Image (cartoon, helix red, strand yellow):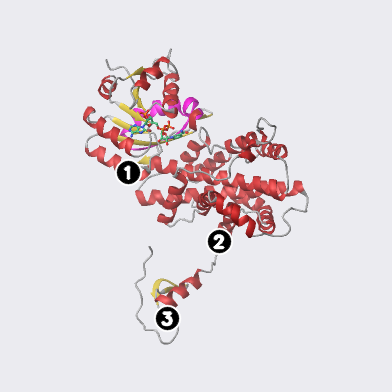
Amino acid sequence: MAQADIALIGLAVMGQNLILNMNDHGFVVCAYNRTVAKVERFLANEAKGTKVIGGTSLEDMVSKLKKPRRVMMLVKAGKAVDDFIDLLVPLLEAGDIIIDGGNSEYTDSNRRCESLRAKGLLFVGSGVSGGEDGARYGPSLMPGGAPEAWPAIKPIFQGIAAKIGKEPCCDWVGENGAGHYVKMVHNGIEYGDMQLICEAYDLMKNALGMNHDEMASVFTEWNKGELDSFLIEITKDILAFKDTDGSPLVEKIRDAAGQKGTGKWTAISALDKGMPVTLIGESVFARCLSSLKDERVEASKQLPGPKVTRWEGNRAELVEHIRKALYASKIISYAQGFMLLKQAAKDYGWNLNYGGIALMWRGGCIIRSRFLGNIKEAFDKNPKLTNLLMDDFFKKAILDCQESWRKVVAAAVTLGVPTPCFSTALAFFDGYRSERVPANLIQAQRDYFGAHTYELLTEPGKFIHTNWTGHGGNVSSSSYNA
Ligand code: NBP
């Protein structure tokens, strides 16, 4: 009998918790998993006493669904998603909906959306963020794909999503792979936020010689102000956490960061689109450098840094400068992330609601923060805002931090503490606010060695070539940007 509102395939951590969340909100869910034995186990344990039902096969699962059928997958991204789609297609009928909630590449979602549309089925690729706890009690959900699917899934998605006041951290993002694109950029920003926090920790630990309890109390204080966020909060807990021998556990962890690809995908997309998303790029490279642990150990014995490595000024003052440098750099990172979203929207014809995206990230997800509320306000005030840095609130915020930010980057350089993200953020700020950058010389060099042509300031759009040496010819290369 058709009784379930939605089917959920994939009974690992995300799937199980989302099912229980949906159940709490009054939806009847039919659970299914490739290894079918896990369905019975789930019903007998975690889902015991709930209204959750199970499918003994995909056919059985589909037969238990109300129409239009809604089938959501939370399985490993990649081939597993395509395999399940292939198995589901013959069992579904026109107007039914397949949702992929995994961390899929947006290009895969573009492809799946189009190929399923050709078969009369509606595909939704949804970013899901917030990890285990988010899935259970309120994730951030970023659905995109076939817009006709949205009314049918909206009550479930907005019902289970995290809320800010009464507003759900979930709204329709856009067509095809837009949901997964926004989730990808979210993850890229998460890489940047984490690296910025690490740089602040490195400065406090190595330039200031602070102990872990001192650092934990700094992060506790920071979490009460404009930096208030989930990542600052967990950093405070991590720094305060002691191993069984009473020493900070964090110092026993091998300093080689892992990554599962979404930060890298964001950086690759930024390069493809010609958007200077430098902070996320640096945060990915910082992880790459960290994982060269053995080489670094060897280099540390052979490549000495500056003689003075400790800050000799006022400690409290530098801590406050670091807070401001972190805040300013974070503003740059989000400004860059939204620049990338804007360019993607232009390239793919998505009508992205930037304030809505900020709200989706405001709660439930890993980058949730008070600051995203300010971003939402900026885009609500002016949905056509060219850049976050041009909003009055952020303009003032970054100018207030500027002096401290410069002091921190200068101190880090002098003392030999690597701060790739603080530094690249400041370099971006200085570049972005410059009417003139030295690219005129690049154009001259390109024209000198390769006859690539250049434009004059007075005649943009007209490409000319100069015979710089007197012995080159007058033939020029064609001018295009790749
Ligand atoms: P996993 O990413 O560990 O995936 C486990 C599920 O995938 C199981 O149901 C497993 O079935 C199924 N599966 C695998 Br593995 N290979 C398969 C294949 N070839 N064909 C069919 N099914 C296959 O689970 P998760 O951590 O819950 O994550 C689910 C999705 O959500 C992933 O895309 C993940 O990237 C994304 N995500 C995870 C988090 C998080 O915090 N964990 C957060 C946000 C998004 P089996 O039981 O038969 O092996």
Compared across the picture, whether 401 is left or right of 185 comes to: right
Kind of residue at badge 1 = Asn
Where does residue 412 sit, x and y in percent of width and height? 67, 55
Whether residue 162 is visible to the viewer of this picture, yes or no, is no
- Nearer the N terminus, badge 1 or badge 2? 1
* Closer-to-camera residue (464/47): 47
Compared across the picture, whether 98 is left or right of 410 comes to: left
Q: Residue furthest top?
A: 49
Mark identifier at residue 466 = 3
> Is the CB of the residue bearing disc 3 within 8 angstroms of ligand 1?
no
Q: Which segment is the magenta one?
A: 133-161
Kind of residue at badge 3 = Thr
Q: Which residue is drawn at 46% across and 40% down?
A: 357
Q: What element carries label 1?
A: helix
Q: Distance between the residues labelled 1 and 2?
A: 34 Å
Q: Mark 1 points at which residue?
A: 110
Q: In which quarter of the image is the C terminus?
A: bottom left
Mark identifier at residue 354 = none
Compared across the picture, whether 455 is left or right of 82 comes to: right
Q: How many labels does the image show?
A: 3
Q: Mark 2 points at which residue?
A: 431
How packed mark 1 is, by other alpha carbons closer than 10 Å (few <14, some 14-19, many 20 or more), is: many
Q: What element carries label 2?
A: helix
Q: Does the magenta stretch include residue 401?
A: no
Where does residue 126 sit, x and y in percent of width and height? 39, 36
Kind of residue at badge 2 = Gly
Q: What element carries label 3?
A: loop
How packed mark 2 is, by other alpha carbons closer than 10 Å (few <14, some 14-19, many 20 or more), is: few
* Closer-to-camera residue (289/131): 289
Where does residue 57 sit, x and y in percent of width and height? 28, 22
